[in-house]
Amino acid sequence: MNPHFCPECHRRQFLKRALLGSAALFTAPGAFAESLAATPFQTEGPFYPNELPLDTDNDLILLNDSLDPSIGEITHLSGQVFNENGSPARGVVVELWQADAKGCYIHTEGAARGEERDPNFQGYGRFLTASDGRYYFRAIRPVPYGPRTAHFHLAVNKGGKRMLTTQLYDSSQKLNKTDRILNSVEDPKARASLITDFKPLEGSQAGELTAHWNIVIGRTPEDPKSDRGRRGPGTGFRPDGKGKGKGKR
Ligand SMILES: [Fe+2]
């Protein structure tokens, strides 16, 4: 443990960095004058947390006031949520969940075979957008597990309703070509909209990364039954209050 590490300073620095990062996102005025294509749906999969971590903030690297960071390549994921008419989506809750560096999820059945979960990894976080629709998470670079290419899981909720469930992919991954869930989006342009670049964070001594990705939500909430066959028990935070059912990976 580092005796010079002050959690309070860390939090402050973290917030500062979040604000700095976001300022750079909005230097393209009038970029969205016309209607936007909604971000494609991707299955929720079976590992939406059925037991939420005690800490559900947007920093997945540190749990509560722990001084021990999780294992993995730190990635600053940020972007903006838009409505289809191009306006920023205000007051929406963005959820992010992902496997830890060994492929284990925050879920009672989410451990990869023969692996133990990283006890320091939060695995799930939320971010409430302000009027500009921006979101920010400090996460780890996703890793492939089983047949799946590396991915983040994300969901967007508005007024307690799930508007979008999707996944975000890393452009450097070879498995993107064969991943069945990513390639279930047949339109190449729509599929490409789920993939982003992970770039080195300027000035980072520790090899941290940044990833930027905008999300577009439609006008109507998802049908809570539409993805049921693949959803897990889902007894954690569910905007629709439902989500029972068993599913495959
Ligand atoms: Fe997954």
Image (cartoon, rainbow, N blue to C red):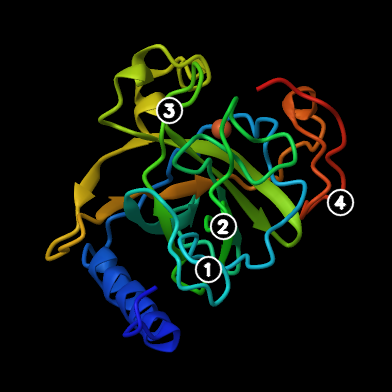
Mark 1, secondary structure of its residue: loop
What is the three-letter code of the residue carrying label 3? Pro
Numbered label tally: 4
Q: Position of residue 19 (x, y in %)?
A: 34, 77
Q: Position of residue 182 (x, y in %)?
A: 47, 22
Percent position of residue 76, x then y: 34, 58
Residue lying furthest left: 203
**Disc 4 CB within 8 Å of nearest ligand 1 atom:** no
Residue 192 in sight from this viewpoint: yes
The residue sitting at 48% across, 22% down in the picture is 148
**Which one is closest to the eye, mark 3 or mark 4?**
3
The image quarter containing residue 94 is bottom right
Q: Which residue matches tag 4? A: 241
In this image, 177 relative to 228: left or right?
left
Q: Quadrant of the N terminus?
A: bottom left
Query: Which residue in the protein does label 1 denote?
Result: 129
Q: CB at mark 1 closer than 8 A to ligand 1?
A: no
Q: Earlier in the sequence, mark 3 or mark 4?
A: 3
Instruction: Compute the Cα span from label 4 to label 2.
Output: 22 Å
Alpha-carbon span between mark 1 and mark 2: 20 Å
Vertical placement of 184 versus 125: above or below? above
Against 178, residue 45 (above or below) is: below
The secondary structure type at the circle numbered 3 is loop
Number of other residues with Cα within 10 Å of mark 1, as a class: few under 14, some 14 to 19, many 20 or more: some
Distance from disc 4 to disc 1, alpha carbons, whole Å, reads: 21 Å
